[in-house]
Amino acid sequence: MSLIPATILTGFLGSGKTTLLKRVLTEAHGQKIAVIENEFGEENIDNEILVADTQENIIQMSNGCICCTIRDDLRATLQDLAEKKRKGELQFDRVVIETTGLADPGPVAQTFFMDDEVAEQYLLDSILTLVDAKHAAQQLNDRQEARRQVGFADQIFISKADLVDKDELDALIHRLKHMNPRAPMRPVHFGEVALKEVFDLRGFNLNAKLDIDPDFLKVEDEHDHGHDHHDHEHGEACDHPSHQHGHEGHGHHHHHDDDVKSFVYRATRPFNPAKLEDFLGAIVQVYGPRMLRYKGVLDMQGTDRKVIFQGVHQLMGSDLGPAWAEGEPRVSKMVFIGLDLPRDILVQGLDQSLV
């Protein structure tokens, strides 16, 4: 049996997760989607599209989608759904997990790799994060969960963009890209988004052949003034509008410094595979819980093919990608997204892993 694709839908309270989900569920795409909600309450999918009462653990919807609450834990729910599918008791093509607005998506994502039974039955496709343009600045300042949701995202949808002016939206996008340069982001209006931007993004394959997005480092490149490894960081003197809050007329601005940050490492010499493996292995032992996502295209000694590598927390995977093209500069590029990561230690260790 082929693996069941799974999508994690996250975003802070009121960001529009349910609106997006409802749109996906009611669109005529011919797919049967199992939805796992880890809380039923005010954010519940509107009852008019449910055909059974919510006392049931699994609810069959009018369009063939199913919805289940997590009573115990996610692992048990996923296994239960897979078993029912295997026995022919339930028909569905994929799973969407809608997290509570206060959730850190990390443990949800890890379920797909840490549990053998789940890993044998499901493929985690991507994490989608909704960001509420109207309230994002405050939420990102005040709530670590909101920052983590951005850091984990494979795709960011910005809701309520019509409620803010262009400068405010630009400042928000600038800030989000600084936190997570690898996730494409775009405004959505009332959840109206093409299904191809929601499913089969293959954003989370740790070991499969990965299509590397050539733009995933572009945001950092804009700030990189030809230095070898060190790109622009927001220092105390940064006066970008997203770094100022409500102090007009006071002659100073409050500097926020997000704890979720990204930085890019580049090298023009190839890596020694054994040294790099030892260093990364040691780093994830110590800093793994703070490393949200990391990804790279590497020039490795001993192969003419690109090595694609990515990870989440302590889980890493790598694979051989396409060959380096003739005349293409063999530059290794890595992006790290995490909570207060020790950039200097990472840069030093990576430098020492080069041939």
Image: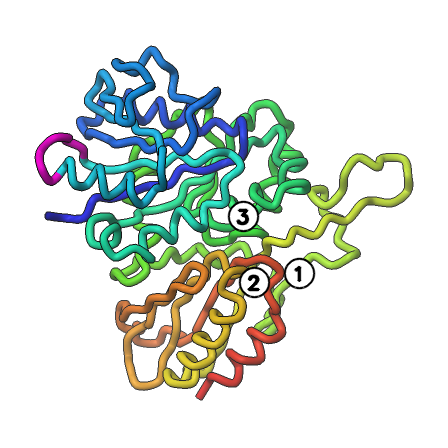
Label 1 or label 3, whichever comes before in sequence order: 3
In reply to whether residue 45 is colored magenta, the answer given is no
Amino acid on which the number 1 mark rests in the picture:
Glu
Amino acid on which the number 2 mark rests in the picture:
Phe
| Disc 3 packing (10 Å; few <14; some 14–19; many ≥20) | many
Q: Which residue is mark 3?
A: 148
Amino acid on which the number 3 mark rests in the picture:
Arg
Counting every numbered tag in the picture gives 3
Image location (x, y in percent) of residue 276:
43, 80
- Residues marked 2 and 3 touching at CB (< 8 Å): no
Q: Nearer the viewer, residue 136 or 301?
A: 136
Image location (x, y in percent) of residue 72:
35, 38
Q: Please tell me the numbered disc located at residue 233.
A: 1
Q: Quadrant of residue 169?
A: top right
Helix, strand or loop at mark 3:
helix
Label 2 or label 1, whichever comes before in sequence order: 1
Q: Is residue 166 left or right of residue 59?
A: right
Q: Nearer the viewer, residue 243 or 101?
A: 101
Q: Is residue 201 above or below residue 280?
A: above
Q: How far apart are labels 2 and 1 at the CA level?
A: 8 Å
Q: Which residues are magenta?
A: 86-92
Q: How far apart are labels 1 and 3 at the CA level?
A: 19 Å
Residue at image coords 42%, 59% = 312
Label 2 or label 3, whichever comes before in sequence order: 3
Q: Which residue is mark 2?
A: 263
Helix, strand or loop at mark 1:
loop
- Residues marked 2 and 1 touching at CB (< 8 Å): yes
Residue at image coords 56%, 43% = 145
Q: Is residue 76 above or below residue 52?
A: below
